[in-house]
Image: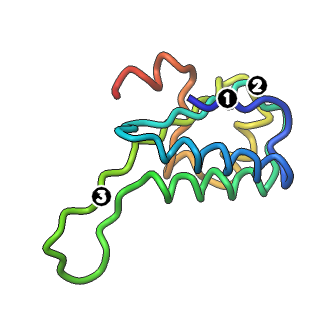
């Protein structure tokens, strides 16, 4: 689990991506939970970084025929309680809830893994 506290902006988004890149190297990693509960500001760079993380953790079939199965990627779960408007408002404004839902708490995020 990666916990983000404070602002998720241009500078801290880079730090988050570095931590996630390191975490994704763990052998046998099956899931990544990013807890945004403590985020007080979510800027466009933070939104973009979370979208990039989603693309790194979501398996999509490539074009054409392949004889090899796709490499399994860890599941991604994002946590932000409904009262954290600093995260919820930009998330809803960008209509990201349909693509990658925010879960209300860590227990819910871990429940189906």
Dot 1 alpha-carbon crowd within 10 angstroms: few under 14, some 14 to 19, many 20 or more: few
Percent position (x, y) of residue 93?
71, 51
Earlier sequence position, callout 3 versus callout 1: 1
Give the vertical position of 86 relative to 52 (above or below): above
Dot label at residue 38: 2
Res 38 → quadrant: top right
Give the secondary structure at mark 2.
strand
Q: Nearer the observer, disc 2 or disc 3? A: 3
Query: Left of 67 or right of it: where is 11?
Result: right
Earlier sequence position, callout 1 versus callout 2: 1
The residue at which mark 3 appears reads as: 71
- Cα separation between marks 2 and 3: 32 Å
The residue at which mark 1 appears reads as: 3
Identify the residue shown where x is 26% and y is 62%. Answer: 70
Query: Left of 71 or right of it: where is 11?
Result: right
Res 63 → quadrant: bottom left
Percent position (x, y) of residue 71?
29, 58
Dot 2 alpha-carbon crowd within 10 angstroms: few under 14, some 14 to 19, many 20 or more: some
Dot label at residue 18: none
């Amino acid at each position: 689990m990666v916990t983000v506290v404070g602002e998720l902006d241009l500078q801290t988004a880079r730090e988050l991506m570095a931590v996630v890149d390191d975490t994704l190297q763990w052998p046998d990693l099956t899931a990544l939970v990013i807890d945004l509960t403590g985020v007080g500001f979510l800027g466009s760079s933070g939104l973009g970084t979370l979208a990039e993380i989603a693309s790194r953790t979501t398996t999509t079939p490539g074009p054409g025929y392949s004889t090899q199965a796709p490499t399994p990627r860890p599941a991604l779960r994002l946590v932000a309680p409904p009262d954290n408007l600093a995260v919820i408002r930009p998330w809803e404004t960008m209509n990201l809830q349909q693509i990658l839902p925010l879960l209300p708490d860590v227990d819910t995020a871990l429940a189906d893994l």
